[in-house]
Amino acid sequence: LIHKLQLLDSGLGFQFQAMFLKLMPQLGKLAATSSKGGKEAKRTALVVQLSLCSIEHLARLFGGLARNQQALDDVVDAVVAALQHDSASVTTSACSCAAAMVWHSSTMMIDHVNSMVPALVGVLESALGPADELTSPRRSKADEAGVLDSEAELRAQGAILALDRIVSKIPMLITPQVAKILRLLLHPAAVGAQGDSDVADAARQARHNLVTLVAPRVMVPALERACKEALSGGSSSIVEASAVALMDLVEFLCARLVEKDVSLYYMQLFRLLLEALDVRYAMLSPAAMSAGKGGRGARTPASAHAVETAVLKALEALVLKLNENRFKPLFLKMVEWASARDDTATALAAKGGKGKTAATA
């Protein structure tokens, strides 16, 4: 069936389209087949995967016509169920199928989109795992580098690519999930310390598309929440690569802002960046120094410097969008902030017995 579908095009007559679309209910039942143990497990997974591939090809060929929409709607629940399959290959096929159904659909119901997107977010969240584990003192060297095992990497990449495609098609409908999607795309395992994995590349592209396509009124609050999560708490709460990726994203947003958006959001972005510059001051606080003793996730001057460098690049991109009247109050505020932080950080460093030079850098 798949081989024959690949040879067809959307110019096929209505009667033949209807004949192929009658297969959808049966394909949906096969795609929703639960995994079985023992010798049947591989066969069941293969049947589900082939069914999902067939549904995807039917959606690509005939989904653009409104009269065929009902056939796609009938298998949405089966595709969502397949996203929870035990096999990573099946889950990845389900991710691709879900993205194709949304992309090629002419009038898919919002309710169906609202069931697909959270399911894809759930796949990504499950594949990446809790971020706290990557900052645990007991983490392995692989975890420390943000490396996923092969199955988790397959699931994560499939979910990221699917979400990226859905965002490209209907950015206005994923608004309720933007903050969570952004948090997952900044997960240490998605950013990757090495930065050259397929997952890291897909996540980087998805982050930029998110900023490009989602309205600033939604994106700026999501960035503020992500910044607070990345830079708050004790020494192990910050993962350098994630914080740097976040600031790079803020820089990308600032460079893209038009005049109308600059006037509305420049103060919010300035406050976000000013809070991010507190990374070294937070590192010197007694609570952070106490929590960082002996921990592999301890915040260091080197990691603070990397974050500060990224923040300053974002601040430069923001300042270049401002006129003199907008810039002058921000400049005075930054001078006031720097003076207050310099005195406090010096006192904290003196109490800690070291680090005066780093504190006042």
Image (tube, rainbow, N blue to C red):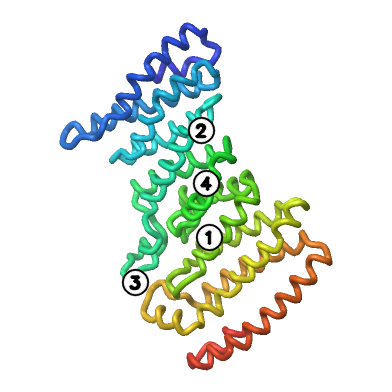
Mark 1 lies on a secondary structure that is helix
Residue type beneath disc 4:
Pro
Where does label 4 land, which residue?
Answer: 176
Where does label 2 land, which residue?
Answer: 110
Tag 2 or tag 4, which sits nearer the N-term? 2
* Number of numbered discs: 4
Residue type beneath disc 1:
Ala
Between the residue at mark 4 and the residue at mark 2, the CA separation in whole angstroms equals: 13 Å
Above/below status of 201 relative to 45: below
Residue type beneath disc 2:
Ile
Mark 3 lies on a secondary structure that is loop
Q: Which mark is residue 226?
A: 1
Tag 3 or tag 4, which sits nearer the N-term? 3
Q: Tell whether label 2 touches label 1 (CB within 8 Å).
A: no
Q: Nearer the viewer, mark 3 or mark 2?
A: 2
Q: Residue at x 38, y 44 (%)?
A: 155
Residue type beneath disc 3:
Pro
Mark 4 lies on a secondary structure that is helix
Q: Nearer the viewer, mark 1 or mark 2?
A: 2
Place residue 333 in its image quadrant.
bottom right
Place residue 224 in its image quadrant.
bottom right
Residue 175 in percent (x, y) is at: 55, 45
Tag 3 or tag 1, which sits nearer the N-term? 3
Quadrant containing the C terminus is bottom right
Above/below status of 39 relative to 208: above
Instruction: Judge from the rendering whether residue 310 lies leftward or rightward of residue 320; answer left or right.
Output: left
Tag 1 or tag 4, which sits nearer the N-term? 4
Q: Nearer the viewer, mark 4 or mark 1?
A: 4
Instruction: Judge from the rendering whether residue 28 lies leftward or rightward of residue 108; answer left or right.
Output: left
